[in-house]
Structure formats: C-alpha cells, structure tokens
C-alpha cells in the first residue's frame, strides 16, 4: 500500500510540475541558472570519470583478449561499444544521481522545512512548477551534451592510456573504433540519457518537496532520492535496452 501511495503522490506531483509557467521570462531565467548549476558544473566530474573508465575498459579488454586468433582491432571496438552503449549513458547517470539528485533533494527539502515553499504558495504561485520544472528542463536539455562529452573523453582516454602503456597499438585502436560503427548507438545513448535525466530530477524533487521535519529528515530524503533514482535508472535501462535494441 505504501508503494501505491507513493506512486500516486508522485503522479499528482508531476501534474503540478507540468502546469504552464505563469511567467515565461522568469522560467527562462531559471532554466539558464539550472543549466549552469546542474549541467556546466558537472562537466568536470563527468570528464574525469569518463577518461579513467575509458582507460580501464581498454586495458582490461587488451589483457583479456591476448589471443593470436583474435583481431588486433578488437580492443578499440570493444571499448567503443562499451562506452557508447552503457557507460556514457547509464554509469554517468548513476554518478549524476548522486551529485545532482542529492543536491536537488536537499535544496528543495531545505526550502520545505524552512517554510519557503509555503510562502511561495501563499503568494499564489505554483511552487512545484516554479521550483522543479526549470530543473527538469535544464537536465533534459543539457545532459545529452554530457553524454556526448563522456563518449568522446572515454574513447580518447582509452586511446591515450592504451597506447602509452603498450596495451594496444595506436593504429589498431583507431581501426577498432572505426570498425563496424553503428550510428544508432549514439542515438540510443542519448535517448537513455534524456529518460534518466527526467527520472533523476523528478524523483529527487519529489522526495525534497514532500519532506517533513527538520535537517535530519532533509538528509534522509536526499539519501532516498539517490537510492530510488539509481534503482529506477537500472530498471529503465533494462526496459529501454529491450525496447530499442531487440
């Protein structure tokens, strides 16, 4: 029953969020702020993690395919497909669920317990729409750029570390990256990223918006936001993979 109640309240929350903004200019200004806060400030961590994960994937693939019967370009091909299909969408989304999700939940939760949201409601403003819709819009618009950045940095990191450590020859890696390339893999990663961005922002905002108590409860709501966002990312990853690649 608790699960059904939570799902129902979440759906009603989304109905409030997606009402038409009262002032388009203010909404646009808030979206720009959220792009900077949720998107631009995530570029650093996404780039660093993508670089080292691309390197690790390349080295592990190279050391597990040391077989004269396997083509030399296999390392680059495997690294490319791993990064495009799974890492740059799903793994990066899990990282952002921890960074962005906890930030959203704690920010909105703090506003709830300090009665700032009540003050917004008293002024006749739809607080859910005013606070949450710009975050959703910013994440859905900008996260695909983070996904593409992650793909490029991951493949570059695999090449640099793979060649510098002698795990793979430069030309073999480049040949593998180019071999049997399927452009839809990039589209597939972006589609997943958009869905994950929506899940992270809405679930995190939901737990922050309905928090009750004080600072302790705000911390607990942030933890719940990260956990449930991560679970839903993994669930929808399975569903989207079956739907788009089957």
Image (spheres, rainbow, N blue to C red):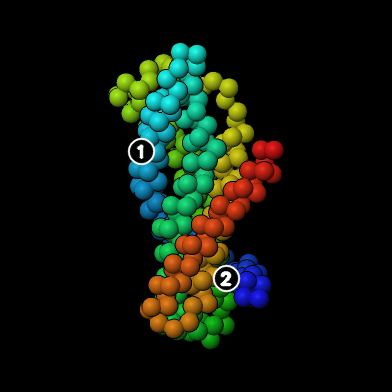
Out of 150 and 68, give the one closest to the viewer: 68
Answer above or below: position of 79 versus 169: below
Answer above or below: position of 74 versus 134: above
Q: Dot 1 surroundings within 10 Å: few (below 14), some, or many (20 or more)?
A: some
Distance in Å between CA atoms under marks 2 and 1: 38 Å
Residue 201 spot, x, y in % from top left: 52, 61
Q: Dot 2 surroundings within 10 Å: few (below 14), some, or many (20 or more)?
A: many
Residue visible at 48% across and 82% down? 212
Which residue, given by chain and number where applicable, does mark 1 sit on? 52
Residue 241 in sight: yes
Picture quarter containing residue 171?
top left
Residue 76 spot, x, y in % from top left: 46, 24
Out of 182 and 245, give the one closest to the viewer: 245
Under circle 2, the secondary element is: helix
Residue 156 spot, x, y in % from top left: 39, 30
Residue visible at 63% across and 43% down? 241
Q: Mark on residue 129?
A: 2
Picture quarter containing residue 157?
top left
Q: Quadrant of the N terminus?
A: bottom right
Q: Quadrant of the C terminus?
A: top right
Please identify, in this view, whether the residue under mark 2 or under mark 1 is nearer the observer. Answer: 1
Answer above or below: position of 116 versus 8: below
């Amino acid at each position: 029953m608790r699960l059904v109640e939570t799902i129902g309240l979440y759906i009603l929350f989304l109905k409030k969020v997606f009402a038409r903004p009262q002032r388009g200019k203010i909404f646009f200004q808030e979206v720009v702020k959220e792009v900077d806060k949720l998107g631009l400030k995530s570029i650093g961590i996404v780039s660093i993690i993508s670089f080292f994960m691309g390197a690790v994937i390349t080295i592990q693939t190279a050391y597990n395919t040391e077989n004269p019967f396997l083509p030399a370009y296999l390392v680059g091909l495997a690294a490319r497909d791993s990064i495009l299909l799974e890492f740059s969408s799903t793994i990066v989304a899990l990282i952002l669920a921890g960074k962005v999700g906890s930030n959203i939940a704690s920010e909105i939760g703090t506003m709830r317990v300090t009665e700032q949201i009540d003050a917004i409601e008293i002024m006749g403003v739809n607080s859910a729409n005013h606070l949450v819709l710009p975050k959703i819009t910013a994440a859905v618009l900008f996260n695909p750029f983070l996904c593409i950045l992650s793909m490029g940095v991951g493949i570059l990191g695999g090449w640099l570390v793979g060649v510098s450590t002698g795990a793979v020859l430069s030309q073999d890696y480049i040949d593998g990256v180019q071999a049997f390339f399927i452009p839809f893999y990039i589209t597939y990663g972006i589609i997943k990223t958009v869905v994950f961005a929506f899940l992270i922002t809405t679930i995190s905002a939901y737990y922050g918006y309905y928090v009750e108590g004080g600072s302790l409860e705000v911390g607990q709501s942030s933890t719940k936001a990260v956990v449930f966002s991560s679970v839903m990312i993994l669930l929808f990853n399975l569903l989207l993979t079956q739907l788009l690649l089957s």
